[in-house]
Image (tube, helix red, strand yellow):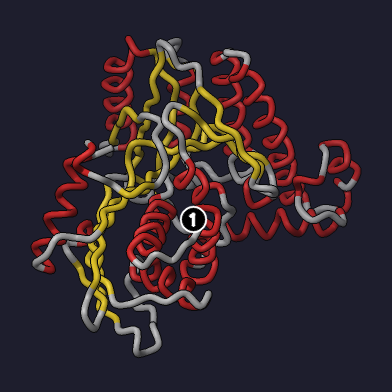
Amino acid sequence: MNIKLAKQITISYQDHFGVNPDAVCFAPGRINFIGGHTDYNDGFVLPAAIDKGVFTAFGHAQDISTAVALDANNERLIFDFKFDLTISSSHWHRFIIGIVSVLRSMGLQLKPFNVVFGGDLPQGGGLSSSAALENSLVLGLNHLFQLGLSKDEMILISQRVEHEFVGVQCGIMDQYASMFGKSGKAIFLDCRTLIARSVKLPLDGYCLMLINTKVKHQLSEDAYNDRRAACQAVANLAGVKALRDLTPKALDVLKDKIDPENYIKAKYVVDEMLRTQKAVEVIEAGDIISFGKLMFEAHEGLRYEYDVSCPEIDFFIDLAKQDSDIIGSRMMGGGFGGCTISIVRDSAYKRVAHEFSSSYLNQFGKVCEIHNVVLSDGARILNFESQ
């Protein structure tokens, strides 16, 4: 976790409001090793929180509330609880107004507050910066006003904000991973029941390389919602609640009744749920090599069946397949750009980073960002004296 940034957020709060914050919170971003687009199909996922995320500094205010976005050149949002809250054109305003509105709709009593926030997650990188911001906000307000919310309640509030204020009909994976992450472990989550268990990755001799392509292709939110609608259409045709309830054989029986493009997408989802369960089995058996192969398989499904990849992402995956020091790689997040995650031999990290970044620059004329990420604990209130 970036303690330097956390302290910078604290100092910024002091500069803006003239007092120390009452609380500083951190909520991490997440990577998803396998289980892409299965969460909103009531399926299984295997995400993990990482050591990058969003920090928020909170304090009580007198009459009006002020939010300051450090990453947006200290842009301010000022609002008054005495009036109906409206959303402006600025994207980040939706998260602030959304969290406040959902909490108030639940009958919870909020008073004016000030907040400064910022993070070190690549924007648009598929690392769930939105979920990290939502979780950090709701965690901070819960602490500041002693609302008595459980972590399970808080992630559902964050998800409501995505659905009702941001316009993305996401599943629960991102919010769950950001809230409940465990250091050194992934989370095997059943998105229907929210039953989960931590799974320790056997990464001795390996590390996690995150490559940010720094591209985001148009228009990922609409395409995401379109794919969710396609999955639900197939489930409805099959007479089940979600694709979680279909086996490959049951889906195949319906093939002639399903739009061909929708069938291919549904097939990917059903296969990916089985692949995710298999991934947990090989991890718990200590077989990191087989796990890496499943990551490559998962990306092939995202690329050719679910059709959510892009040339820049595929370029890095193709390079990874040819490198003997990389045992697994796949795209991150909803798709259409963002980041890849790879399992790389420790001794080869610097070489791979240099070669891949040079190749990307030569191929696309763009500079990528490469990060070594570590699996992290989930959202929490920070106590700098204990650091």
Residue 306's place in the image compared with 369, above or below, is: below
Q: Quadrant of residue 211?
A: top left
Name which residue type carries label 1: Ser
Q: Residue furthest right?
A: 253
Identify which residue is drawn at 43% across, 45% down. Answer: 126
Q: Quadrant of residue 141?
A: bottom left
Looking at the rendered image, the quarter that the C terminus falls into is top left
Q: Is residue 264 left or right of residue 218?
A: right
Classify mark 1: helix, strand or loop. Answer: helix
Image coordinates of residue 77 in percent, x first then y, are 26, 74
Residue 341 visible in this rendered orientation of the protein: yes
Q: Quadrant of residue 355?
A: top left
Q: Is residue 287 left or right of residue 183?
A: right
Image coordinates of residue 218 in percent, x first then y, are 45, 57
In terms of depth relative to the viewer, which is nearer, 169 or 136?
136
In terms of depth relative to the viewer, which is nearer, 213 or 250?
250
Image coordinates of residue 18 in percent, x first then y, are 8, 67
Looking at the rendered image, the quarter that the N terminus falls into is top left
Q: How many marks?
A: 1
Identify which residue is drawn at 32% across, 40% down. Answer: 52
Residue topped by disc 1? 220
Residue 87's place in the image compared with 322, above or below, is: below
Image coordinates of residue 102 in percent, x first then y, are 48, 72
Residue 89's place in the image compared with 51, above or below, is: below
Residue 334 visible in this rendered orientation of the protein: no
Q: Residues within 10 Å of mark 1 (few under 14, many from 20)?
A: some
Identify which residue is drawn at 39% across, 73% down. Answer: 97
